[in-house]
Amino acid sequence: MIQAIRGTKDILPSSSPYWQFAEYIFRTISRRYGFEELRTPIFEKTELFSRSVGEETDIVNKEMYTFEDRGKESITLRPEGTAPIVRSIIENSLLNQSQTLKLWYCGPYFRYERPQKGRLRQFHQYGAECIGASTPESDAETILLAVSVIRELGIDNFKLLLNSLGNDDSRTAYKNALLKYLTDHQNDLSDDSKRRLESNPLRILDSKDTNDIQIVENAPLILDYLDQESNSHFQKLKYFLDNANIEYQISPKLVRGLDYYNHTVFEFQHSALGAQNSFGGGGRYNDLFNQLGGKETPAIGFALGIERLLLIMESIDSLPSIDMRPDAFIVTTSPDLFVHTQYIAQQLRFCGYNINIDLQQRSVKAQFREANKQNAKYTIIIGKNEIINNNVIVKNMSDGSQYEISISDLIEYDFS
Ligand code: HAM
């Protein structure tokens, strides 16, 4: 038997209604905040990600699905959504049409990670990007959108972690201080962190190695190195979030796993997830447009992992109850009557009812069994006599009551 690829999952009919519900919330709430949808291809030139996410990140170093296509071009299945959105905005000159461009997206992403609960190789994200404004107001609006979506999904007890990486000057000052501190502890660092000391010391703050964690405990904090501009941006954002009653925790070691961030970074966590407790994150990326060949454009955005959102919803019992029962199942007493069955089914479907019919020429008994199995609210029984008299029998499956109704009155009947 050919099996699905490790780290991928089929979304089965039993859970697809939950996905549809989540997608409905993404669409509706994004619209409410003035965000429009942008869909990009699921693969891009490899260079797009190495130049944006960063050569030294785990994503680019270890996790990308990269291959050469038949034209010998290096292609990568998108590991994240921000770089493709920026590419598309530059390529389609979308910014010329609007001062602030607010976009959302939703779809599959690919990372070659070790699969475990909540961690897949093909996973799904909903994300949003607010482009063209450098203000803390736009940070606040973007975070508010994320929080609204999370709450609309019925998730309440989450943590919002907040930090600022400041502007270039602040980060350079901080990097120097951090480098000095870490170099003093160099011999005790993990091999990965030793390597990062040169390439990307900030990422050492993120290390999961127990020794590294101890060393990082007393490391200098970025928030002490923010210059006046960076600090004022961060203070204003906090003020806007306080004002909107959004709870957050300042987390000075939050750096995030992608290289394109500056100023505000944030992450959403939920205890229901266990080890993979982060279910979303984002931040500001004022240099990314430049890096990808566009004109300098400030921007901020976030992405939420849909599998992780659904895991949380399941564990806190906030998955919506979704009624998949047919309104009616039509029981036909003889296969000869199929055209009548189909005609009646179509009339009712045109009225908006969910109608199932037998497709296997089964006995009446077997059709009733099927209607019960599907938990149909009503059965409509069609027999030769009924057709001659232009009637059908409608049976209410919850109380067993049944009535004879003329076919022309059927569409007036309330099956809901
Ligand atoms: P990220 O933190 O790499 O950010 O991913 C966002 C979310 O995607 C994670 O919090 C997680 O819920 C989900 N996710 C990531 N990898 C996996 C995986 N292997 N399996 C299941 N879920 C996963 C970004 O991707 C940025 N583009 C966010 C952003 C948008 N920043 C600015 N704009």
Image (cartoon, helix red, strand yellow):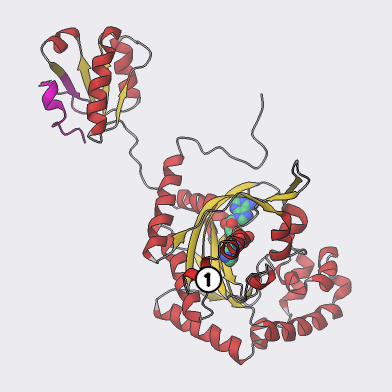
Asked which quadrant contains residue 370, the reply is: top left
Range of magenta residues: 393-416
Closer to the camera in the image, 39 or 169: 39
Is 208 on the left or on the right of 403, as rendered?
right
Look at the image and say whether residue 402 sits in the magenta stretch: yes
Q: Position of residue 331 (x, y in %)?
A: 26, 17
Pick the quarter of the image with the C terminus.
Answer: top left
Pick the quarter of the image with the N terminus.
Answer: top right
Q: Position of residue 11 (x, y in %)?
A: 52, 39
What amino acid does circle 1 point to?
Answer: Ile
Q: Ligand 1 is found in which quarter of the picture?
A: bottom right
Look at the image and say whether residue 224 sits in the magenta stretch: no
Residue on which the image places disc 1: 131
Query: Is any atom of residue 97 visible in this view?
Result: yes
Is 169 on the left or on the right of 241, as rendered?
right
Question: Which residue reaches farthest bottom?
Answer: 228
Crowd rating for badge 1 (residues with CA inside 10 Å; few <14, some 14–19, many 20+): many
Q: Residue drawn 73% across and 74% down?
A: 202
Q: Residue drawn 78% across and 84% down?
A: 176
Q: Where is residue 169 in the image (x, y as percent from the top left)?
A: 70, 86
Q: Residue drawn 65% across and 46% down?
A: 121
Closer to the camera in the image, 407 or 225: 407
Query: Is any atom of residue 278 visible in this view?
Result: no
Respond yes or no on whether mark 1 lies under 8 Å from ligand 1.
no
In the displayed structure, would residue 68 be above or below residue 338? below
